[in-house]
Image (spheres, rainbow, N blue to C red):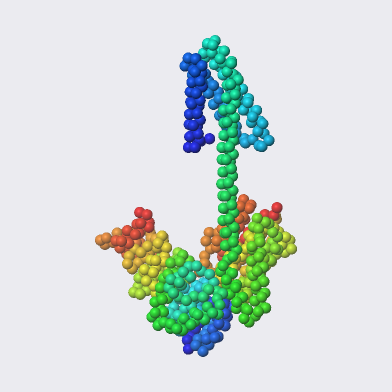
Amino acid sequence: MKRALVIDDEPLARMVVLEYLQAYNDQIEVMQECNDGFEGLKAIHQYQPDLIFLDVQMPKINGFEMLELVEQQPAVIFTTAFDEYAIKAFEAHAVDYLLKPFSKDRFNKAIEKYLAQSPTVAQQAKQTENLLEAVAQSPAQHERIVVKTGTKVKIIPVQDVQYLQADDDYVSVFTQEGSYLKNKTMNFFEQTLDPRYFVRVHRSYMVAIQQITRIDPYEKDSHLAILKSGAKIPVSKTGYVKLKQVLGI
Amino acid sequence: MALTPISSKLYGLFTACGLVWTALVAFIIHGFGFIWYIALTDGMVSTVLLGAACWLINNNLRYYQPGKGSYINLLIWCLALAGICTAGCRWIIPYLSISTAYMKFLSQSLSIRFFTDFLAIGWMAMISMLWYSQLDHKQTEKRKSEAEKLARDAELYNLRQQLQPHFLFNSLNSINALIGFKPDEARKMIHQLSDFLRGTLKKDDQLLVPLNDELQHLNLYLDIEKVRFGHRLETEISCDKNCGEGLLPSMLLQPIVENAIKFGLYDTTEKVVVSIRGEIEGSNLVIMVQNPYDPQTSRPKGTGFGLRGVQRRLYLLFARNDLMETHANDNIFTTIIKIPQV
C-alpha cells in the first residue's frame, strides 16, 4: 500500500483527485488533505508519504518552495492550471504533471506510470533536485528565500539578505535578524539571485552589494568587504574583479 | 521646410530642365538668323519667367489640391500665367537688346510663345497634381495602418487581460469537481462563469457605466471565487442608492478587485474579507477597496501591487494624476479611486 497526500489550496480541486483515486483504493491510501504548503510540510514529516499530489500556486509558499524544504523527497505529481514556466520545467525533467481540469484517463495514466516505475528514494531526490534547479531560474522565484527554522517556515525577502556563507552542504543566509540554514549549494544561489544585486566575492561568500560600505585591502591579492552591519567578508582576487565590474569602478 | 534628399534631387532636375529649355529657345532663335547674344538673352528671360510660373503653380498645388469641380480654375490659372510670361517677354527683352528686325520677330512670335508657355505650365500643373495626390494617399495609408496596429495591440492586450487563464482553468476545474456530487451547483457555476465572461467581452471600455452595473458584474466574479475557495472569502459591498447611480469608466474597478483577490485571497491561508465601499463626496464618486495581505510574502511596490494601469487610465480620461491612492498598513491594503462626476 502506497501512502499519499493531496496538497492544494482549493477544496474542490482536492476533491477531484480524491474521487479519481477511489479506483486505486487497494493500492494507494490518502493519509491527509492539506490546504497549503505549511500543512503539507507537516504532513510529509508526519507520514513520510510515497507520493504527493502538489498544486504549484498556493498561498505564501508555492509548491516548489515547499519541496525545497522537504528532506525525504516523495514522488510528486504536480497539478496546475496555468504556468508556462513550470510546465517547461516539468517537461525538461520528465516529471509528471496534470493540467487542470484533467480527465480521469489522463489521471489514470499518471498513476499507472508512477506504480510501474516505483523509483528509489535516491532517484526521486535527484529528479526533484534537478527540477527545483530549473524552476529556480524563473523570475518569479527571485523574490524571496524560504527556509526552515526548527518546525517553522521563514520567508526571507531577498532585499533583507545581507550575505550568504557556504557551510558544508548548506548555505547560511544572513539577515538583520540572524542567520538561517538552507540546504542548497552556493552555485544554486549564484544562479538564482539577481547578479545585479548579489556578487559571489569568494568561493564561500556571496554579498548583497547594497550592504557594502567599504572595501579594504587585506593580505596579498585579497580584500575585505565591510558591510553596514559591521560584518567583514573576505573577497578573493577574482571576486574583487567581479565586484568592481558590478559596482562600475 | 528642410530639404529632404528627394526634394533636393527634384530641385536639381528642375534647374536642369530650365537650362535645357534655355538652350533650346536660344538655338531656335539663332536658327532664325539672330546673333547668339540676342538668342541667349531671349532664351534666358523667357525661361526664367516660365520657371517662375511653373514653380508658382507647383507650390500652389502642394498646399491646395483642386476638387473635381474646380479643374476649370486650374485651367484659368495656367492661361493667366502663360499670358504673364508672354507679356513679360514682350516688355523685358526690348530693354536688353535693341534691334528692329528682332523687335518685329518678337511681336510676331507672341502667339506661339503664349502657346508653348501654356503647354509647359499645364504640363507642370498636371505632373504636380499627380505627384502630390499620390504622396497624400501614401501618408493616409501609413497613418491608417499605424492606427490599425495600435487598435489591434490594444485589443490583444485587453483580451489577454480579460481571459485570465489561471482563473478560467481553475474555475473549470472546480466545475469538474462539482459535476460529480453537486450537479446543480456545477450548473449554476457554469452560468455564473459564462455571464462573467460575456460581461467582460462585450464591455466597451470607453463607456461610462453606473456603479451598480459594475458591482453586479464584479459580484459574479466574487461568487465564483467563493465557490473555489469554499467560503474562506467573504465580501462586504456597501453602496447607497445615490452612489449606485454614479458613473465610472467601465472595467476600471475590475483590475482593482482582481488585485485584492490576488493578494488578499490567493496569498493568504485564513478567512479573508474583501470590502468595496462607494460614496459620493461633493462632485466625486469615491470607491474604496480593501483587502488583507501578508507583508512577509508580498510587499507593495510603488503605487502598490501593479495598479499602474488603473492610474494610467484615470490620467488618460481625466488628465489628473491624483485620482488614485493606495495605503498599506496593519496588513490591510487600501485602494481609493475618485471619479469626477460631470
x%, y% of residue A41?
Answer: 48, 79
Would residue B186 appear left or right of A81 to someone viewing this image? Answer: right
Q: How many marks?
A: 0
x%, y% of residue A136?
Answer: 43, 69
Residue reaching furthest to the left? A220
Work out whether residue A91 or residue B334 is closer to the camera in this orientation and state it.
A91
- The residue that appears at 58% across and 27% down in the rendered structure is B119
Work out whether residue A135 or residue B292 is closer to the camera in this orientation and state it.
A135
Residue reaching furthest to the right? B241
**Quarter of the rendering containing residue B161:** bottom right
x%, y% of residue B301?
Answer: 52, 61
Residue B188 appears in view: yes
Work out whether residue A42 or residue A82 is closer to the camera in this orientation and state it.
A82
Residue A143 appears in view: no
- The residue that appears at 53% across and 73% down in the rendered structure is A99
Residue reaching furthest to the top? B100
x%, y% of residue A40?
Answer: 50, 79
Would residue A169 appear left or right of B252 to someone viewing this image? Answer: left
- B84 shown above or below A28: above
- The residue that appears at 35% across and 54% down in the rendered structure is A249
Work out whether residue B331 or residue B61 is closer to the camera in this orientation and state it.
B61
- B89 shown above or below A208: above
Would residue A185 appear left or right of B301 to someone viewing this image? Answer: left
- The residue that appears at 53% across and 23% down in the rendered structure is B47
